[in-house]
Each structure stands twice: as structure tokens, then as C-alpha cells.
């Protein structure tokens, strides 16, 4: 898409209530597949005010080069600005994530960013701790996952004892309750 064909947002005075569909999986993948687009979306997930494209490009460049805006070189700023202007801003406009007013150079977030924000938070969480996705018991707290397998094995053993009538049913019931409460106490103490 050429830069001269970028849509110009009208910024109406009244907030128009439009029903915006949640993004599809393919759309999310396309939007989040590029780090610079993710940074633009991340910026607007924490900032609600309009921003000049140049200032947004500086912010994205600072994130990309892990530095402050003041320490960016002109080459770094220009590289990110051109990429945003020619590629990423049009893509985000096409997907109704932002509005871009070419005549003023202002970029405005839309409500669509709220739908994408939870995916960005997950991406940030997994980037800071990749082990979250690798553990088979990742949805359990660490202590619970530590005792879950032994508890399951113990439960199967108690069931076998009852099945073959090795011990009385009252003893099995007592053992089951003690095991359950011990597990809960260990879980809550940690």
C-alpha cells in the first residue's frame, strides 16, 4: 500500500458507537507477528491520548534499541519512522486498531486495541518468563504441581486397597479425608 493512499481519519466530535468484531486468529497472528506493530499496540494499550507519528516512532525505536528517546541516533529514529509510516501504520489502520490523520500526523487508538491487549499481555508475560508455556502443569501453582502427581498415585493406591477389600471402608474414608486436608494445608502454607 503506498503512503499516499493512507486513509485519513476524520475524528468526529461525537463518539460513534460501532460494533467492532473481535479479531480472528489469523488477524491476531498478522498484527502481532511484527515487533514494531506489537510496540505500537503496547503503547496504545497504556496511552489513550492521540500522539504524533514522529513521537510514536521515537518511542518504538527506544523500545527496540533498549535505550531512552534522548539517546537515539538520527539513523535509528529514521529507520523506525519509515517502517511505521510505510508498512505498520497502514496495516494497523486496515485492521481498525488505530486511526491515522495524514494532514496532522496524529495517530489515535480505537476500541479494537482493547480486544488485542490481552494477547499482548500474554506475550509480555511469556517473554519475561518462557517457562510458563513449557511446563505441563503451568496452570497450577508450583507447590500444587509438586504434590499433584504423588497425590494421584496415592489415591489410586487407596482405591486398589478398597477394591480388593484389604482394609475397611471406614479406614479408606479416613485416609482419603486426611490426605485431602493435608494437601490443602500444604498448598495454603506455601
Image (spheres, rainbow, N blue to C red):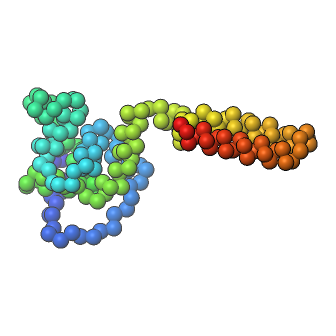
Query: Which residue corresponds to the image point at 77% horizontal and 42% vertical from the top-left?
Result: 175
Location of residue 49 (image quadrant): bottom left
Q: Nearer the viewer, residue 158 or 14?
A: 158
Numbered circles on residues, count: 0
Image check: 30 left or right of 88?
right
- Residue 90: give x, y in percent of width and height: 22, 49
Left or right of 86: which side holds 133? Answer: right
Q: Give coordinates of residue 2: x percent, y percent.
A: 18, 47
Residue name at image x 16 percent, y 44 percent: 56
- Which of 10/146 is in front? 146
Q: Quadrant of residue 144?
A: top right
**Residue occupying the point 39% across, 58% down:** 22
Look at the picture and state if 6 lies above or below 121: below
Residue 156: x and y in percent read 78, 39
Q: Is residue 102 in view? A: yes
Answer whether residue 83 is visible to the viewer in this image.
Answer: no
The picture places residue 55, in percent across and down from the top left corner, at 12, 43
For the residue pair 52 and 66, the one nearer the viewer reads as 66
Residue at point 30%, 54% (across, down) = 113
Taking 148 as reference, is 45 left or right? Answer: left
Q: Quadrant of residue 125?
A: top left
Amino acid at each position: 500500500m503506498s503512503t499516499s493512499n493512507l486513509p485519513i481519519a476524520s475524528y468526529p466530535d461525537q463518539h460513534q458507537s460501532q460494533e467492532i468484531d473481535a479479531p480472528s486468529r489469523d488477524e491476531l497472528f498478522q498484527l502481532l507477528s511484527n515487533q514494531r506493530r506489537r510496540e505500537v499496540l503496547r503503547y496504545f494499550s497504556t496511552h489513550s491520548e492521540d500522539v504524533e507519528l514522529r513521537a510514536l516512532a521515537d518511542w518504538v525505536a527506544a523500545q527496540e534499541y533498549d535505550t531512552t528517546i534522548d539517546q537515539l541516533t538520527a539513523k535509528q529514529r529514521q529507520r523506525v519512522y519509515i517502517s511505521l509510516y510505510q508498512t505498520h501504520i497502514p496495516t494497523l489502520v486496515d485492521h481498525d486498531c488505530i486511526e491515522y490523520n495524514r494532514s496532522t500526523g496524529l495517530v489515535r487508538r480505537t476500541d479494537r486495541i482493547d480486544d488485542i491487549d490481552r494477547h499482548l499481555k500474554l506475550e509480555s508475560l511469556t517473554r519475561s518468563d518462557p517457562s510458563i508455556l513449557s511446563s505441563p502443569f503451568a496452570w497450577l501453582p508450583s507447590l500444587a504441581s509438586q504434590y499433584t502427581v504423588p497425590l494421584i498415585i496415592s489415591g489410586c493406591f487407596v482405591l486398589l486397597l478398597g477394591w480388593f477389600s484389604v482394609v475397611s471402608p471406614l479406614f479408606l474414608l479416613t485416609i482419603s479425608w486426611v490426605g485431602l486436608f493435608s494437601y490443602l494445608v500444604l498448598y495454603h502454607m506455601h
